[in-house]
Image (cartoon, rainbow, N blue to C red):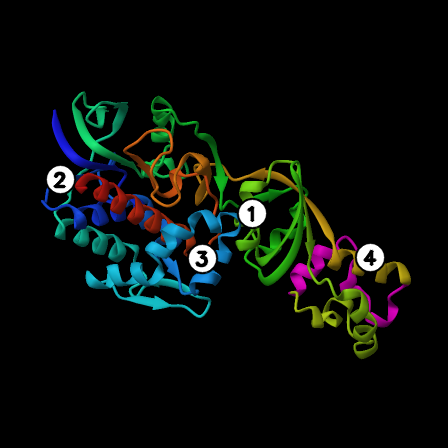
Amino acid sequence: MKHYSIIVVGAGPAGFCAAISAARIMPVKGHVMLLEGGDQSGRKLLLSGSGQCNFTNVLDKDAFLKKLGSYAMYLKPAYYNFDNVSLVSLLAEAGCKHFEREDGKVFPASFEAEDVRKALLSQLFRVGVELRCNTRLASVKKTEAGFELGLENGSSLSAGKLILCTGGASYPQTGSDGKAARLSKALGHHPVPFRPHLSSVSIGYFDRFKKCAGIGLIGIQAKFITQSGTFEAKGDLLITHKGFSGPLILDNSHLLAKGDEIVIKWFPDIEPLLPEMIKNSKRMSVINGLWLTKIPPALLRAILSPVAYDLMTMSELRKSDRNWIIEGLSSSSYYVKALGNLSNSMASAGGIPLSEINAKTMESRLCSGLYFAGEIMDYALPTGGFNIQIACSTGWLAGQQAAKQTTN
């Protein structure tokens, strides 16, 4: 049985960074092994952002952490240890230049995810990490010397320290099937079942919106009435063929379930402004006369259906019509018919509870020498480059701490 000082399982962003940071500290090359179950490393990374790979965000430290919501304080040590500037520099050292978009999202200059993967591979091999693909973990056992790893091919490996970076359970065809989280039970952990995150939702009785597919709106407010409580959020909204998507929905999808209610505030200021619109656009059709809302006509027709406001001028609006318009544009209610599933969601929530992982080291609080990083941890982050960055940040901290514990 071959022994390694540190074995990292899962060759995604978290695993790459864990292995690289560990190997940079280890005094002798070849003491760090990175295992990947598939035939290629970084398979999910290659799908990120439809292949363009929005890998971080340019926000300053405080603004970045604020975007992480309730997970900010927990993830602060990892992010401060390896932030967006550190990740950009790591990739640049290996020849991957970056491009900062106006909305703060950072991409490889080529807009090719493969360039990010190549840069991480280059850094990995530069520090002497051994990468082994087509090697799937079947079992893990704690020993006096560290850990014994049983592999699906029947062979075994041993490690002094073990870092699990196997991701969540979304896009399982890329290798993120949630199995390693289940294996952690043998080491005393209590993984939370994975559920879809960054997922679009299908909406009931949505036929009237089908002609609106592809329409996007900026800064839409919504109220979510769920089985576990009510909350409000604001963000960009995208109309799909079956329902809603865009950051407003994606970032909150892990909190939703079938039957929940979404109240969209398409134009919350409609009531005080409607008289002015009527006064200034008396001869225009209602759909065209509501131009101040900046809502595309096709979407206005769908929101205000079934009344045919194309055939009525603004001056012809009755009190009942005005009330219908105010209600429709200020608080339209829709119910969730279905959520996306793990096979087509961009991420997942669930995994190892954060209470079972030391935020300052990423080491298990229940099993010494065991570390976690990335989406295997039970957090749910927004779109915009935050997920890959935090995978890298937690991975870097885990590898760094594992190596320090090994060399002390």
Q: Secondary structure at mark 4?
A: helix
User: Where's residue 47, x and y in %?
Assistant: 35, 49
Which of the two labelled residues, at mark 4 and mark 2, occupies the earlier sequence position? 2
Spot the residue most to the front. Answer: 408
Name the residue at 80% across, 60% down: 326
Helix, strand or loop status at disc 3: loop
| Front: mark 2 or 1 | 2
From mark 2 to mark 3, how far is it between C-alphas? Answer: 35 Å
Part of the protein shown in magenta: 296-318
Residue, far bottom: 280
Q: Which quarter of the figure has residue 122?
A: bottom left
Which labelled disc corresponds to residue 252?
A: 1
Secondary structure beneath dot 1 equals loop
Question: Callout 1, which amino acid?
Answer: Asn
Q: Earlier in the sequence, mark 2 or mark 1?
A: 2
Which of marks 3 and 4 precedes in the sequence?
4
Which residue is identified by label 3?
384
Q: Is residue 316 magenta?
A: yes
